[in-house]
Amino acid sequence: MFRYISLGKGESSGDLSKTELNNLTIVGWKVGVVQHAYSEGTVLTASLGSTAGSNAVYNANSIGVPSGAYLWLDIEDYSSSSNVYGFCEAVFNSQYFPALYYGAPGLDATQVEYLLNNVYFEAAWAGCGAPTGIGEGINQGP
């Protein structure tokens, strides 16, 4: 099961809470933690990535996500003037393993391959005709 954490510092209503995470893991569920994507058309920058990463680590720590877990970044429908590599490289620099989740319209095969070879440990996608054979681990649909 995957559940979202907030983009901002501090969990928002409806996002994964410490109580929910605890209750799910007590009964044996494995919970993937994904940080929400920015809204459509956002210009992604290294500075914004650094802020997103700091907030993700803060939120994950505050709800009890253990060190060494995967922490997923959701990246979707961003502005064409974005610095995608700078943003993605700046996001996670912590005790968590960085994982990349992308959707339509998302990253192309060259971007995904670069990020998997240089930054991220795992990748997953949904609904974007994602490239195959370059290490993606989870396909969430057509």
Image (cartoon, grey):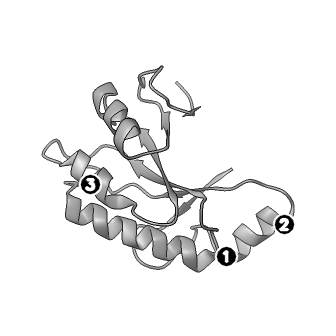
Q: Looking at this view, is 89 or 41 the one in front?
A: 89
Where disc 1 sits, the SS reads: helix
The residue where tag 3 is placed is 87
Badge 1 local density, few (<14 within 10 Å), some, or many (20+)? some
Q: Which mark is residue 18?
A: 1
The residue where tag 2 is placed is 26
Mark 1 touching mark 3, by CB under 8 A?
Answer: no
Q: Residue furthest left?
A: 81
Residue 105 visible, this orientation: no
Q: Is residue 108 depicted above or below 26 in this figure?
A: above
Q: Is residue 18 depicted above or below 35 in this figure?
A: below
Q: Nearer the viewer, mark 1 or mark 3?
A: 3
Residue beneath the point at 64% across and 68% down: 66
Q: Amino acid at mark 3?
A: Phe
Residue 21 visible, this orientation: yes
Q: Is residue 128 depicted above or below 2 in this figure?
A: above
Residue beneath the point at 23% across and 54% down: 42
Q: Amino acid at mark 1?
A: Lys
Q: Is residue 82 left or right of residue 58?
A: left
Q: CA distance from mark 1 to mark 3?
A: 28 Å
Where is residue 121 shown, x and y percent of the image?
Answer: 49, 44
Residue beneath the point at 78% across and 63% down: 24
Q: CA distance from mark 3 to mark 2?
A: 35 Å
